[in-house]
Image (tube, grey):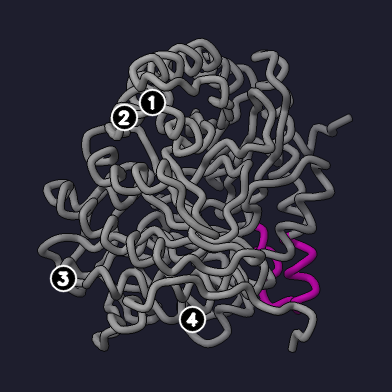
Amino acid sequence: MLGTYEILETLEMIQKENLDIRTITMGISLRDCCHSDIDISCKKIYDKIAKYAENLVVTGQNIEKEYGIPIINKRISVTPIALIAESCDSEEYVKFAKAMDRAAETVGVNFIGGYSALVQKGYTKGDKRLIASIPEALSTTNKVCSSVNVASTKAGINMDAVAEMGMVIKRCAELTADSGALACAKLVVFANAVEDNPFMAGAFHGVGEPECVINVGVSGPGVVKCALEKVKGADFGTVAETIKKTAFKITRMGELVAREASRRLNVPYGIVDLSLAPTPAIGDSVAYILEEMGLEKCGTHGTTAALALLNDAVKKGGVMASSSVGGLSGAFIPVSEDAGMIAAVKSDALSLEKLEAMTCVCSVGLDMIVVPGDTSADTISAIIADEAAIGVVNNKTTAVRIIPAPGKKVGDIVEFGGLLGSGPVMKVNSYGSSEFIKRGGRIPAPLHSLRN
């Protein structure tokens, strides 16, 4: 039974500290939508998504009104399309993206993810066709998001795919140059991708998932920062304990929303993702949490240690509130979506290299990084390879969502709008990596029995 104090405390978190549910994401399996005729397959995909998700948005809105809990996004993830599309003879894979986009428009969700391929160990012909179609698919649709898994701890790193994704990202940027290379913001390159991630742009409905499922992602950096303001000067044991207790309260709200949405939609409840997901709003920043711990600016020495503490404490507090935890679960550090990160980059406290180091202990990876438009495809591939190596060796998920903004140089600002925010263009290393990327093949999986 909740006490009056706890209810008032939660209301204060919502009203003053930007606490919200970041997303309700419905995962839908499309494995029964395969067909040799691409038009029939696309129709089956549209019909199934439109049918299963027809009440998703209104259900989320009703829960918002009845419980007073803001639910920012309602989204859909589907089976990686490369798996579905391969059964058809056509190479016009963009038709699948347009069918997904139409279905997303019909049911009114913000985004639909799953225009994806899993190529960590090698390509099939369907994977090749899908990856080649990503630039056109993302530049001719509004709500479709795409991801490609290029590495795993068991398979190693598919360097052919890494090299190709550098070129795909450059092409995405060229085709959407008039919108700041927006297509790149809808494309994620993963290592060790998870199958139940509710967050875009990397969400997809894994092959081990049920027919349909509800996953929820919580937010709440502002709440954690406000809690730490009350223990100023205390030791790190107290800091960790404070974050744990706060994460418990945040996750408990996510659990409530997940179960209620599941019941009303008559769809199984999957997981709550414990991630702290920032927004561009002032006060809703992961960087400001790190600075509240005593760092003068996010990015200075000590930042990685502070982020490690934060990530661990969020997980420990969250698992007390829910026995169904999954997804990425941790702290996101996207640059353009976090006011504190943006400020840190503008003041030269935070560099690409420091962000890479932080990804060793955070939830995802290099996220929403804007780099100069003349950054070469090989350099982008090398950045992906570095990030994949961190994920593969440390047996964790890592990802790259990078935006080479056409015509922009270091220090410029690129506006994306909405949750995507605005990103300052960051400096990349000026020395080349072409000969390294041209080698191709596969970097073998690491040996884990001789760890040091």
Q: Which of marks 4 and 1 is in front?
A: 1
N-term mark: 2 or 3:
2
N-term mark: 3 or 4:
4
Span colored in magenta: 227-243
Q: Name the residue under label 4.
A: 296
Quarter assignment of residue 390: bottom right
Q: Nearer the viewer, mark 1 or mark 2?
A: 2
| Quadrant for the C terminus in the image | bottom right
Q: Mark 3 points at which residue?
A: 374
Q: Is mark 4 on a helix, strand or loop?
A: loop
Q: Residue at x 64, y 47 (%)?
A: 327
Q: Which of marks 4 and 2 is in front?
A: 2
Q: How far apart are the two marked residues, 4 and 2, measured between alpha carbons?
A: 56 Å
Q: Is residue 339 left or right of residue 429?
A: right
Q: In this rendering, does residue 343 appear at all?
A: yes
Q: Is mark 2 on a helix, strand or loop?
A: loop
Q: How far apart are the two marked residues, 2 and 3, measured between alpha carbons?
A: 34 Å
Q: Name the residue under label 1.
A: 100
Q: Which residue is drawn at 32% across and 33% down?
A: 93
Given residues 227 and 345, the one toward you in this image is 345
Q: Residue at x 23, y 59 (%)?
A: 170
Query: What is the number of the mark on residue 364?
Result: none
Residue type at the position of mark 3: Asp
Q: In this view, does 429 lie to the left or right of 47?
A: left
Tell whether position 230 is magenta.
Answer: yes
Q: In this rendering, does residue 142 appear at all?
A: no
Residue type at the position of mark 1: Met
Quarter assignment of residue 378: bottom left
